[in-house]
Image (spheres, coloured by chain):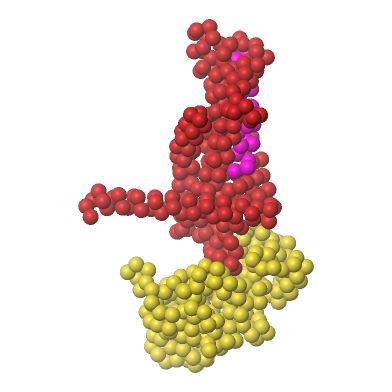
Chain colours: A red, B yellow
Amino acid sequence: MNIVERAGARLLAPMLSSAGYAVSIGLAAVARIPHLLRRRRSLFDQMHLSGVKTLHVVLFVNFFIGMILALQLGYELQRFGQQQAIGFAVSVAMVREMAPVMTAVLLAAAVSSAMAAELGTMKVQEEITALEVMSVDVASFLVVPRVFGLMFMAPLLTVLGSIIGILGGGIIATTQLGVDFHGYLLNATEALEDRWVWWLPVPKSLYAALIKSTVFGFTIAVVGCASGLQARHGARGVGDATRSAVRNSIILIIVLNFFLGKLIYTT
Amino acid sequence: MATIELRDVHKSFGAQKVLEGLSFSVEQGQSLVLMGPSGSGKSVILKHLIGLLKPDHGEVEVMGKSVPELSGHELSLLRKDMGYLFQHSALLNWMSVFDNVALPLREGRDCAESEIRERVQKVLALVMLEGAELKLPEQLSGGMQKRVGLARALVTEPKVILYDEPEAGLDPEMSASISATIRRLQEELGTTSVTVTHSTSCAKTVGDLLAVFEKGRIIVSGPPAEVLASELPRVREFLGTPID
């Protein structure tokens, strides 16, 4: 093997192995959907941890994202005398892109990392081995509540993030651009009246946000669990697992966002 | 037929040979203690017995079943008849003592909650931990954590128990107490056990048989009193104690 092949093998083999493991964890979680009822107590615990405990950060960040969007887009629109359209621009940007992606990135940083650290610590302290030795189904006991807890909470947080972002944009529109707040809100809601198909009661943009955030929530949790369960070599290994969970989650969010956006808006 | 049997087991991790043709057997109800220097592969033997590792060569049989050849489901069934006390207890930190001990009964066994309660209380009494049910592991001393781990290993009434350094990290008094508890339970329940330890006092208390192990092989075995009195130079060097 030459140096390029050796470098490729060293780099690609662990990456493929980790990716394969994460896919197997995701499939194991899906196969255990019927266990959700039995795991409801852990599921609610995880929903509390991933949803309620991150709510304030999600609201705070999305509020500022809405204000930044209104500020930057508003000044440009103002140059052409189109500042009345600011509600439309902020609303579309927040609901379709910014809220799902920013919320997912925050969840990757706050929740996926915590999952990797928690499961990684359990792994290096032999607690996962103890569960295996006791014939406990680790995927059902530890992975299912985490994956579905986050998957259920991510869309909810995204919707709340979108609302607070639009309100943040409204404050800037009113105070900096001289746009009437009522008019801003009307403009913002009009932007969301695009229907995907006539029988769906919710705007297409909102469906896009819900689909994206559900996929992001599932992905982030699977990556966090898989990274944690692969941890080894003590505290350093837990650190590596946490770092790779956040890094891989964010990369996947960005890549999936592109493909989901393309899929949703070209159909 | 022996309850536990290893025949010509070899295991390497990379270039490092850990087990080199290891063979031993443990009869039903017998307690085997394995002693050896750190890093000699004692815990590796226990991991082979419980199916966490597979040998490169050789046979590992527990209760008549060839452990390396079992499917995931069959291994899970076999493990339900086995208990394992981890060196650092490996308790789940967010669960109370009661929930930790009840875990193997709640997961994968059809036990009613009333039966679980009864069995957990019984086993906590056996290890002298009544009244600690609601405590979290972090609120317990190392010795108490070890006893919770022991209770968890016993609650399923296993036929085989594996103890990985049961006295590790404990003061001499607590170490003696754990060893005595293991011996008492051994006599009361009649389980077959394999104990890995560095402690001669633990070996004397717990074992029916003692094997000193080095470089992947057993260098001497027999009743603990005989082995501890062995004049083999390597045994004396390892034990570091004068012959009585």
The stretch in magenta equals: A151-174
Provide residue A109's location: percent of width, then percent of height: 53, 41
Q: Is residue B105 left or right of residue B38?
A: right
Q: Is residue B174 visible?
A: no
Provide residue A97's location: percent of width, then percent of height: 53, 29
Which is nearer the eye, A39 or B224? A39
Quadrant where the image shows the N terminus of chain A: bottom left
- Residue drawn 44% across the image and 53% down it: A20
- Residue drawn 56% across the image and 42% down it: A217
Is residue A92 positioned above or below B86 on the image? above
Would residue A161 be counted in the magenta stretch?
yes
Magenta span: chief secondary structure: helix
Which is nearer the eye, B83 or B56? B56
Residue at the far right in the pictured view:
B114
Provide residue B167's location: percent of width, then percent of height: 57, 74
Would residue B184 be counted in the magenta stretch?
no
Residue at the far top in the pictured view:
A81
Q: Is residue B102 visible?
A: yes
Is residue B212 positioned above or below A13 on the image? below
